[in-house]
Image (cartoon, rainbow, N blue to C red):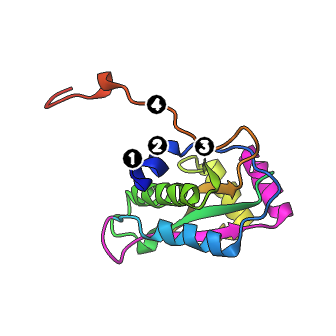
Amino acid sequence: MSDFEEIINTRRSIRQYDDRKVSDEDILKIIKAGMQAPGSRLGAEPWEFVVVKNRETLEKLGEIKPRVTKAPVAIVLVSNIEKAFYKTVWQQDMGAAAENMLLEAVNLGLGALWNGVAPTEERMEKVGKIIGIDDITDTKPYCIITIGYPADGWENKFMDKFDEERIHYEKY
């Protein structure tokens, strides 16, 4: 199995972290991976990122998405829809960025969790207010990725999810 296959096959949603801090260098690598994602059109990628380490802010975000509360760091993925090429499919571009970030976390020996925010308007508004984009037109929080070193029993490990019955050829 290649390193890439191992990363894809062992990535899991890590919901509990130990107390170690995540380095700024690793956070930047994860964000860079997000920025390498495919977008609807080159140069029109809508993603922006808000890194949150402040415990009080993490707790406020945790009131909306409880798993954020105890994470060492969270990255809120924000779509700047003005920068998107296709204004109605920005969520697809953001999903690609989020997945790249989750895979890079595994590559770095970290765990991560995708905490959905969009498309629920109430959640988007609440998260936007906490991170300071509530008054900015055309920006929307997409998700919150929590990152940390997996707590005991929460490691990234292979779980076979393959189901041949879900594969269809030519027609459903």
Read off the magenta span.
Answer: 40-69
Q: Earlier in the sequence, mark 3 or mark 1?
A: 1
Res 1 label: 1
Q: Position of residue 95 (x, y in %)?
A: 46, 54
Q: Is residue 16 above or below residue 132?
A: above
Identity, as a three-letter code, of the amino acid under mark 4:
Asp
Q: Position of residue 152 (x, y in %)?
A: 76, 42
Q: Separation of disc 2 and disc 4 at Cα? A: 8 Å
Residue 24, image quadrant: bottom right
Label 2 secondary element:
helix
Q: Nearer the viewer, mark 4 or mark 1?
A: 1
Residue 38, image quadrant: bottom left
Is the residue under label 2 in contact with that under label 3 (CB below 8 Å)? no
Res 160 label: 4
Q: Separation of disc 3 and disc 2 at Cα? A: 12 Å
Q: Earlier in the sequence, mark 4 or mark 1?
A: 1
Residue 126, image quadrant: bottom right
**Residue that label 2 marks:** 9
Res 13 label: 3
| Residue closest to the far top | 165
